Image (cartoon, rainbow, N blue to C red):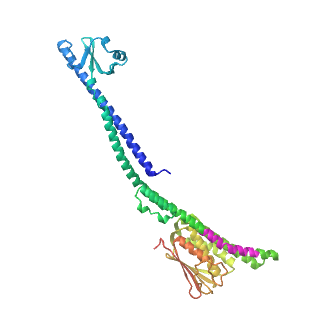
Amino acid sequence: MKSLSSSISRVIIATVISISLIYSLLIILYAWTIEDNIFNRLVNDEATYITEQFKRSGVVLPPKANYMHLVINFADLPIEIQKEYPSNASKVEYQISSGKTLHMTTLELGGQHLFLLADVEQFEVSKDNMPNLLVWLLVIACVISAIALVVSLLTAKKITRPLKTLASQVNTKNADNIEPDVFPENEIGLLALNTKNAFTQLNSALDRERVFTKDISHEIRTPVAIIQNVLSESKEEKIITEDNFDTVAKAVANINQITSILLALARTETSQTEVVNLTAELESLIIKQFDFLLAQADKHLELTLNFDGDVEVTCNQNLVNILMLNLLSNIVRHASGDNADITLNNRQLIFENHTQQNTINSPLASGVKGKQSGGLGHGLNLIKRICEQLNWQLHIEQPQGYFIVKISFDNPLND
């Protein structure tokens, strides 16, 4: 695996070297251009001087500079100039076979075409100083590269340090070990925060799956075993008795109840919340389900509803419906009197019913039930877990002859 620090250093050094080479080339080109422009300006100034003197005196004076001379006949020009000039009359610099560099300009004096040549070889400093210039440019490039190497190593170390820290934290596969606050407030800090959120969601999903698998294997096994025993007995007797039918019906109801609760707790969407009118939801549930539950239990029970207007709470509507359905089902199954009370206000939801059973120790634990209960002891434990999912508090009170379930809201909208 390639090191990110080494990659950053290589990129910085390569960039610095490339810039140094380009800059050195520009310096050399600039030096040559300046030198040529100086020669051209000297030749042009001499040509201007000769032209002005001719206008005054009518005499063509020789150049003042001893490295310049006038050529009257085109045939007297060096052969290299004679070949190139006709096709490129604007060219001013020529290299001849002797190695000299000539700069040339033309003059029109009295209808005569003259050529002013300047031998600038003795003034060309670029060629003489080029070796030294290249050495100095190389030394400067090496110094800059060394500085860039140090800077790149420090920069790469600074950049990769938080990434290495994040990688070590992620390697633990524990969201609690990822601390976004210790990282800089840039893309790395955002990456740490998103990674922590992703791990939290993943671990939550794994926890829900693990708990669901454990619960489903534990809770479903008993009602399935009851159904199997009843079917086995009925097969031998070749008839299903009324008691066996009731037993199977209760077991199927238990399976449906357990499955609906466990699936609701296992789904990711249970974390999605909205504003729910608990009063409207509970009233709708009682209208739709209460008579059906009474018929199933073959009981007569009257409900006393104490609702304090519309109570709105931020929660997951699906979980709330399952919670209230199970509480209503439990109150129908286990009520021993003819009346039960349901109270709803801005702070609490209370289910209260008469009971003849003795006080139950640890009623919220899984598998705990009253002696007279025909259930499996999972109801209140699952209701407790739903409340935990909703961030609500569940309390059980068992005064003499009563069983009271109290649910307190943490996030009421109505104060």
The reply to whether the magenta stretch includes residue 109 is: no
Q: Looking at the image, can residue 22 be seen?
A: yes
- The spot of residue 407 in percent (x, y) is 53, 77
Q: Nearer the viewer, residue 34 or 234?
A: 34
- The spot of residue 102 in percent (x, y) is 30, 21
Instruction: From the viewer's perspective, tell me whether residue 405 is left or right of residue 230.
Output: left
What is the chief secondary structure element of the magenta stretch?
A: helix
- The spot of residue 209 in percent (x, y) is 59, 66
Residue lying at the far left of the rendered structure: 57
Q: Which residues are magenta?
A: 211-230
- Quarter of the picture holding the C terminus: bottom left
Q: Quadrant of residue 235?
A: bottom right
Q: Quadrant of residue 214?
A: bottom right
Q: Nearer the viewer, residue 140 or 252?
A: 140
- The spot of residue 359 in percent (x, y) is 59, 86
Is 387 situated above or below 195?
below
Residue at (58, 81) in percent of width and height = 363
Q: Looking at the image, can residue 91 be seen?
A: no
Q: Quadrant of residue 207?
A: bottom right
Instruction: From the viewer's perspective, tell me whether residue 415 is left or right of residue 223.
Output: left
Residue at (31, 12) in percent of width and height = 74
The mark tally for this picture is: 0
Instruction: From the viewer's perspective, tell me whether residue 208 is left or right of residue 157.
Output: right
Is 231 situated above or below 50?
below
Residue lying at the far bottom of the rendered structure: 400
